Image (tube, rainbow, N blue to C red):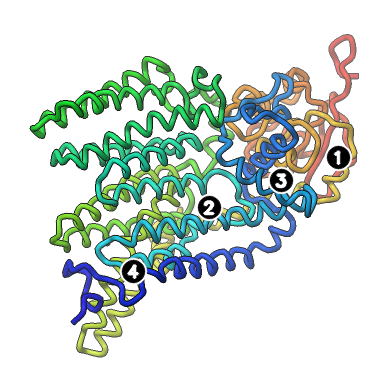
Amino acid sequence: MTGAGRAPERGERVQLPGGGMRSLPLIACFSWLAAVSIQFVMQWPAIGALDFSDPDDTMRMAQIRDLLAGQGWWDIHQYRVNPSDGGVLMHWSRIVDAPIALAILILRPLLGQPAAEHVVMALWPAILAALLFLICVLAFRNLSDRRIAIGAPILMATSAALMSQFRPLHIDHHGWQVIFATLILWQAIRPASREAGIFAGLAGAALLAVSIEGLPIVTLFAGLAAVRWALHGRTEDFDRLAGMMGALAVGAVLFQFVTRGPASLTEVWCDALSPPYIAAFAAAFLPIAAVAFRMPRSMPMRFALLGFAGLLAAGALVLVAPQCASGPFASLDPIVVRFWYSHILEGQPVWLSGARFTAGMIVAPLLGITGSAMAWRAHPDAADRRQWAVLLVALTGATVLALFVMRAAATAHVFALPGCVWLTLSAWTRARALASTPLRLAATVGAIMTLPPTAGAISAVALGEAFPQLKVQDEMMSPTEQADQTCLPKDVVRELNALPRATLLSPLDLGAPLLFWTHHKVVATGHHRNNKAMADTLEAFVGPADQAEKLVRRRQATLILFCRTAYDFEYYRRASKDSLAQRLDAGHPPGWLEPVAIGGRYGLSVWRVKPEAPSGRAE
């Protein structure tokens, strides 16, 4: 029997027949094309109407528009947010902005600015997805069972948790996070070398430049490289570790300088790549570089050295910025945490999202862990076992992270692909080898049920029945991410843009869409760098209406806008009986406001702040 016909559990390296390796890019292309075609068909109405499902996408486009309008490359302020304080310095990276801005520049002479934006926002996520499909094929083609490189892109196309990060109009940074994390994984399962380490370190630095949320993933792979060297003391493993840590430190400085400018090398921020993190990477690299001249021969000495490097890194971080030890969101005002941060589901544990979402997020990683563990156990070859061990540890770490931060699930789903494919191939091969027809049919059905989409659907039903509270959460979860846009149909946007440019006080989740659709400024959007203005906005809406006047005037807002169907306005309205939100919803505004006849039939209300009289009261 040929290797391709045997069960993968036997540990034999399974090759692809004929020109199988040459056809891998073609398989990835067809899988990608099928996935994005389905997305375009399902979301065509939203694409046509520019109906964004995430306010971050509209804010990203506002940032790109400012860049194209002449704002400096290193100036990432958003001046139309919190204008009373001179704007907000955003924590986002030009790495994400640059290709989108370039594509718009290329298309603008042919289509005009609005159409060029529309086309690029629709197509760019699909282009990023194509890159991810290609990376996965290249990364997984050298695993022990080459059929994994065929099954991985096909399975990827069925992953809602993964493909949702590459849906049309979703131009924010989450797709880039998945891509850079997958590049690091690719280098981790390659044969050890300094080049693989350098590539992984640069990918890690780019991931952190895009978002500091990638720090756990980068730390995980750095720890993996370190443990592999400490356990065996092989020169090639040390080369990988030294290359990764050196490239991480140097790459962090390089990306920081290129995308944020010289000033960013001295400004301390806990929510973005900045000096405290760069100092930690450099401190960790120094003892590793030093031992290159005299390699520790014993395992205890190697582990002691790594422990010392870790202590140096932690000490450097705390010394440069002790406040960063508490995390990037520790400084948020309590009212911002209560009414905004705690309701951002993508940053919360997966079990808060209902049975269907919980199953969709965790079933594939759990199947991948199972398959990776079985593959590791089945292979007698040391090199194959090392590859599967790396996949198993990386996937387990990513899955734990995803359990507590739902937006990390997409990365876990990529890492789960090899294990999921191996598990299904193993079950299928075993089923087809059974002599009894009834048993073979039953086992074949069982193999199909190991596929993540099938297992996820079954698990969602089972979870909903076993935990009724999760089922209730599912039923309560309407497509709220689109609620903001129901307040801003085109005719309402025209009416708002007909008003003289003003500063608007609005629910936080409506702030970014207002920047995208209108020429107005806003007091705050749902972005944590603007913590004080966010707190004032929330205090104004949820506090007593009479006290809100002082906050509104201090922020120089001349219009107040709210929408009954806005996701976050529901929380404002329930805060207290005499809150500004409750009175506006009831149509009984305080005396310092007057109505503006715009958009009432859409659940949107606009109120003008009356000029302040010399006595301090509104006229």
Mark 2 and 4 residues: CB-CB less than 8 Å, in contact? Answer: no
Residue farthest to the left, as pictured = 298
Query: Gap between marks 2 and 1, in whole Å?
Result: 31 Å
Residue at point 89%, 36% (across, down)? 499
Type of amino acid at the residue the image marks with label 4:
Thr
Q: Nearer the viewer, mark 4 or mark 3?
A: 3
Type of amino acid at the residue the image marks with label 1:
Asn
Per the image, label 2 sits on a secondary structure element best described as helix
Query: Gap between marks 1 and 3, in whole Å?
Result: 25 Å
Q: Quadrant of residue 556?
A: top right
Q: Nearer the viewer, mark 3 or mark 2?
A: 3
Query: Gap between marks 4 and 3, in whole Å?
Result: 46 Å
Q: Position of residue 1 (x, y in %)?
A: 18, 82
Q: Position of residue 498 (x, y in %)?
A: 90, 39
User: Mark 4 or mark 3, which has the lower sequence index?
Assistant: 3
Q: Using the image, determine if residue 335 lies above or below residue 387.
A: above
Type of amino acid at the residue the image marks with label 2:
Gln
Residue at point 39%, 64% (across, down)? 152
Mark number for residue 497? 1
Type of amino acid at the residue the image marks with label 3:
Leu
Q: Nearer the viewer, residue 283 or 476?
A: 283
Residue position marked by numbered label 4 in the rendering: 450
